[in-house]
Image (cartoon, rainbow, N blue to C red):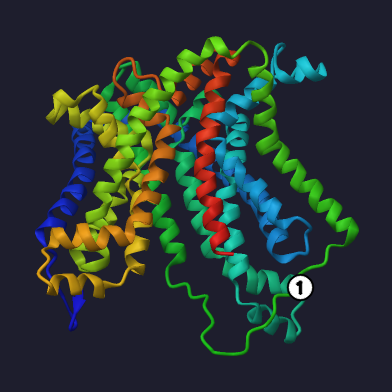
């Protein structure tokens, strides 16, 4: 709390748990570095600079570039059509092009694979046998059809938020529509583009399920095979560190590109009504043809393939196994969501109510788990458990802790936003009445920000329900979540057996999309 120009010292009930959260983020990474540097310099050099490492780097870069290019080509026109034109049914389009977020990358890969082969959807329904999608093309397509809504949502918000008078001023000075777009509109879209590219880029670098099903060797897939086969755990640790370095470099470049950018209007000039582009009958037809193509590929395809495989055999015999996997997913998702909310609370209070260099450091460290690729983060916990907490190794508790820390920022964001909107005067009044820090937190702060706490926990819950890479490395023996079972059966070609699990994952991922759409509706 800032009072009289000086920052108050945070109470121990807030500061100590927040610093413990920050420490918990750093310790596993320390053990990862410790394990990677356990060999002599010559051995390390031979591991890091081997030709295979260079090949993995090239494949990872090619995949990220391909996905970023394709998602931008999809999201850009969609955002422009729904915000800057008189497109009929724009609200419906916004919903349809956001729904693919309910189809995770590995489920999209399952759908694409389900199209191909002699017994696949295309040959059975249309008599056309497609080759199995794989490699760079298959991974790029699967990840792009899942992640393009992240860029679309950013661009749509940016296009709707640009001050219309800025563009109108450029037109009044004689600029052509093309010049207005490239010299005025596009520069204002850069922050949104960079933010979308950051989210998509980090996801692609850390993805495991889609690239593994598409048999495309990138760092995340090689890390898992190296660790699972127990060939060389030191090399696996170095692969994880390189993966972390890639993610950090992406974050660093994104922050440098945004550095010093200013896009807000500085004057108080008169506002202008936004000029909407009239498409006309032909334009409406072309626009809806493009929209239909994207929605059919990103949403219609997985739904059609899923219905096809679900109808291949009766679903009732599969329900007991499906229920078991669902309950196992639930056993990880519920405690992870609750723990993430509890851990995020002191961090958010420290950051918002007691700003200082310490609170800034704690807040940044709290995002470390989300910035580090999931497999690398999980491997760090493996080395931590083996080195300092062996009773935790291969336990349900370790999986829950890793989930809570990895997805802590998802809980932290809504809680922090709620705290910014809550009036500090209520807390000051409670203190003046003799309430201690814990009582203020319990009776004043929590009731005010409970919606933010619940929203954050819901986000963590939905993400954990469909999470794959962390579960693969940290799940105890016999733990078969929905995602793990789907991946295992798809990789073995058991498309019919995998279908009920894919349907369940899409259903629960829809909760996440519902939260996103609700947030969008509130800000329109």
Q: Quadrant of the N terminus?
A: bottom left
Name which quarter of the figure residue 255 lies in: bottom left
* In front of the other: 131 or 246: 131
Q: Secondary structure at mark 1?
A: helix
Q: Position of residue 391 (x, y in %)?
A: 14, 23
**Above/below status of 96 relative to 298:** below
Q: Position of residue 317 (x, y in %)?
A: 54, 9
Horizontal arrangement in the rendering, residue 88 relative to residue 499 (left or right): right
Which residue position holds label 1?
Answer: 177
**Above/below status of 116 relative to 165:** above
User: Residue placed at 36% from the left, 22% from the top?
Assistant: 226
Tell me the crowding category of disc 1: few under 14, some 14 to 19, or many 20 or more residues within 10 angstroms, Cα based.
few
Name which quarter of the figure residue 111 lies in: top right
Whether residue 187 can be seen here: no
**Outermost residue toward the right?**
281
Q: Position of residue 307 (x, y in %)?
A: 67, 23
User: Residue placed at 27% from the left, 66% from the top?
Assistant: 352
Q: Quadrant of the C terminus?
A: bottom right
Whether residue 295 can be seen here: yes
């Amino acid at each position: 709390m800032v009072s009289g120009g000086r920052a108050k010292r945070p109470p121990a009930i807030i500061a100590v748990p927040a610093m413990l959260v920050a420490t918990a983020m750093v310790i596993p990474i320390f053990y990862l570095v410790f394990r990677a540097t356990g060999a002599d310099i010559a051995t390390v050099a031979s591991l890091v600079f081997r030709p295979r490492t260079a090949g993995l780097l090239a494949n990872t870069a090619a995949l990220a570039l391909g996905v970023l290019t394709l998602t931008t080509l999809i999201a850009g026109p969609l955002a422009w059509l729904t915000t800057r034109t008189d497109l009929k049914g724009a609200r419906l389009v916004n919903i349809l092009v956001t729904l693919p977020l309910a189809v995770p990358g590995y489920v999209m890969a399952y759908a694409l694979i389900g199209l191909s082969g002699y017994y696949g959807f295309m040959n059975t329904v249309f008599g056309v046998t497609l080759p199995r999608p794989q490699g760079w093309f298959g991974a790029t397509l699967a990840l792009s059809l899942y992640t393009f809504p992240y860029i679309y949502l950013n661009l749509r918000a940016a296009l709707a938020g640009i001050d219309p008078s800025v563009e109108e001023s450029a037109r009044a000075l004689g600029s052509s529509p093309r010049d207005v777009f490239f010299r005025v509109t596009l520069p204002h879209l850069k922050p949104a583009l960079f933010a979308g590219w950051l989210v998509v880029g980090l996801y692609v670098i850390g993805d495991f399920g889609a690239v593994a099903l598409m048999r495309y060797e990138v760092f995340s897939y090689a890390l898992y095979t190296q660790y699972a086969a127990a060939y060389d755990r030191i090399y696996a640790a170095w692969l994880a560190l390189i993966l972390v370095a890639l993610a950090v470099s992406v974050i660093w470049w994104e922050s440098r590109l945004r550095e010093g950018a200013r896009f807000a209007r500085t004057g108080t000039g008169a506002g202008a009504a936004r000029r909407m582009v009239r498409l006309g009958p032909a334009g409406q037809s072309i626009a809806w043809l493009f929209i239909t193509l994207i929605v059919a590929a990103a949403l219609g395809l997985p739904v059609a393939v899923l219905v096809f495989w679900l109808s291949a055999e009766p679903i009732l015999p599969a329900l007991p196994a499906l229920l078991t996997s669902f309950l196992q997913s639930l056993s990880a998702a519920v405690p992870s969501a609750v723990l993430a909310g509890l851990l995020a609370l002191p961090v958010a209070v420290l950051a918002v109510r007691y700003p200082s260099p310490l609170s800034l450091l704690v807040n940044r460290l709290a995002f470390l788990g989300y910035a580090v690729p999931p497999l690398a983060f999980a491997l760090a916990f493996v080395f931590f458990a083996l080195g300092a907490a062996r009773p935790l190794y291969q336990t349900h508790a370790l999986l829950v802790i890793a989930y809570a820390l990895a997805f802590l920022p998802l809980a932290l964001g809504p809680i922090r936003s709620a705290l910014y909107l809550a009036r500090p005067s209520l807390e000051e009044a409670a203190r003046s009445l003799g309430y201690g820090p814990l009582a203020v937190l319990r009776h004043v702060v929590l009731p005010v920000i409970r919606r933010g706490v619940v929203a954050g926990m819901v986000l963590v819950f939905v993400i954990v329900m469909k999470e794959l890479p962390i579960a693969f490395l940290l799940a105890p023996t016999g733990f078969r979540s929905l995602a793990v079972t789907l991946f295992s059966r798809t990789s073995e070609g058991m498309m019919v057996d995998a279908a009920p699990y894919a349907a369940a994952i899409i259903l629960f991922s829809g909760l996440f999309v519902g939260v996103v759409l609700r947030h969008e509706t509130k800000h329109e």
